[in-house]
Image: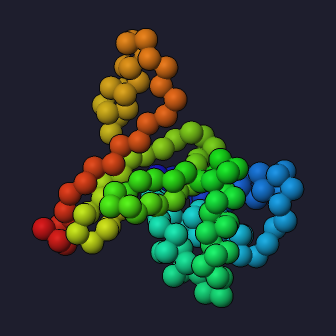
Amino acid sequence: MTPTSTEETGTWAESARERISEAGLRRSTPRQRVVDLLDQQDCAITALEIDARLDRVGRATVYRAIEQLEELGLVRKVDLGGSAFGYEKVEPSGHHHHHIVCDECGKVEPFEDDALEEAIHEIHRKGFKLESHEVTLHGHCSDCD
C-alpha cells in the first residue's frame, strides 16, 4: 500500500510507538529504527534485509525487535516460500495486500485485486467464519524471465 498523502505516511509508525509504550517496552533506538524502516516499506521485507539496511544494529536485536512487534500485532509474518519469511506492518485501518514473489531472485511486490477480496469474503455464505487470509503468488519477474 502506498500512502496517498504525506499526512498518512507516519500513521503506522506513530501507532506502533504508542502500542510499544502501552506494552511497557522502552523506546530503544534499535527498535525505533526497525519501526522506521518498516514504516517506509510498501511490502514484506525479510529480517536479513532489515539487518543489512540498519548499520550498528545487531542481527539478534533485529530479530528480537521483529518478534516483539509481531507479538504486539504491529507486524505480520508473510510466508514467501522456500523457508523464507518476510515481515510487514499491520495497518491500523486493517487495509492489506497480497504478494507476488519471484522464485528466482526473491523480489516481492504487493498485489491488490478487488474481485479477489470479494471472492474471499463470499466464504461467509458457506457458513465459514473467516479469521484471516493470505495470498502469495509465485513466478518469475520480468528481470528473471
| Residue 105 x, y percent position in the rendering | 27, 72
Q: Nearer the viewer, residue 9 or 12?
A: 12
Q: How many marks?
A: 0
Identity of the residue drawn at 50% across and 64% down: 41
Residue 18 in percent (x, y) is at 79, 54
Whether residue 95 is visible here, answered yes or no, is yes
Q: Residue furthest left?
A: 145
Question: Residue pushed farthest front?
Answer: 83
Residue 3 in the image, given as x and y percentages of width and height: 52, 55
Where residue 87 sits in the image (x, y, percent)?
51, 59
Find residue 21 and report its image quarter: bottom right
Which residue is farthest bottom?
A: 56
Residue 80 lies, with reference to residue 116, above or below; the image says: below
Left or right, residue 136 beside residue 127? left
User: Can I make out residue 8 in this image?
Assistant: no
Q: Is residue 45 above or below residue 137?
A: below
For the point 36% across and 52% down, which residue is it? 99
State the residue at coordinates (67%, 66%): 65
Colour logic: rainbow
Residue found 55% across the figure and 78% down from its top? 51
Residue 56 sits in quarter: bottom right
User: Which image quarter holds the C terminus?
Assistant: bottom left
Is residue 98 positioned above or below 115 on the image? below
